Amino acid sequence: METHVRVRSLSVAYGSKPALQEVTLDIPARRIFAIIGPANSGKTTFLKCINRTIDFIPSAKVTGEVLIDGRNVFEIRNVYELRRRVGMVFPLPVGLPLSVYENVAYAPRRAGMRDRYELDELVEKCLRQAMLWDEVKDRLRLLGTRLSGGQQQRLTLARALSHRPEILCLDEFSIAIDPVTTMKIEDVLRELKRQMTIVLVTNLVQQARRLADRTAFFSASRLIEVAETETLFTQPANRLTERYVTGDFG
């Protein structure tokens, strides 16, 4: 299985408080890779390292390597290009103060796309992938921030897809979405993994089991175990992993 992201001895501290400690793992290409674990175990910090949004936290001290296609992301000078390649969807929607259409078209325009037909096609495609098109196709000029919370979250997903990323990082994407829509987006993610690598942080253990090809379990800022998903859930190598996936603690 081709490896897309290699993480080697990754450690992060916020001031004197460790957030990740010596994490080493591989993320396969064009697969869904889930990260589970209790709160404050370093899951979101791990995602932020992949596309270097960790840079926005002044107190963060990072050591180790995150290699995408063999290149250490912390040595990349063009961080904007890195974040185009590595899309991120955060737990709560972060909408731009623009119309629904322009929320999705913004990044492609910045990248030089000018043809209106091409833009229209891309906006519709991304909104369909985010399971939002049918709800907003007649309201594309509406301010995106006037949508409901769940719709704004899906708009954020559509905006991330508009970058045409190679890697898509999802941090609790379903937290503001109803269960029916969540299941539909899960179906979309299964299709998207044919085109891109997906890294999914979720507190919904069964969501990881449904979706992921491989799963990593983090606890207390450390990687406890990583394995094929069904193996991790049915034959975990670590007792702590077993306790977590069976609901003994969380």
Image: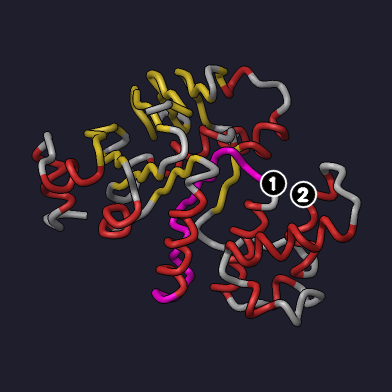
Residue 163 circle label: 1
Magenta span of residues: 163-180
Where does residue 123 sit, x and y in percent of width and height? Answer: 74, 62
Q: Is residue 240 left or right of residue 219?
A: left
Q: Secondary structure at mark 1?
A: loop
Q: Is residue 119 above or below residue 240?
A: below
Going 59% across and 58% down the picture, which residue do you hit? 157
Task: Choose between 76 and 185: the one closer to the eye.
Answer: 185
Going 54% across and 43% down the picture, which residue do you hit? 195
Going 55% across and 53% down the picture, which residue do you hit? 89
Q: Amino acid at mark 2?
A: Ala
Q: Is residue 34 left or right of residue 68?
A: left
Where does residue 187 sit, x and y in percent of width and height? Answer: 43, 62
Q: Is residue 147 above or below residue 64?
A: below
Q: Is residue 37 above or below residue 131?
A: above
Q: Are marks 2 and 1 in contact (CB under 8 Å)?
A: yes
Q: Is residue 189 above or below residue 66?
A: below
Where does residue 81 sit, x and y in percent of width and height? Answer: 71, 32
Where does residue 136 sit, x and y in percent of width and height? Answer: 69, 78
Residue 122 located within the stretch drawn in magenta: no
Going 26% across and 34% down the picture, which residue do you hit? 226
Q: Is residue 209 left or right of residue 148?
A: left
* Pointer 2 residue: 107
**What predominant SS class does the magenta segment belong to?**
loop
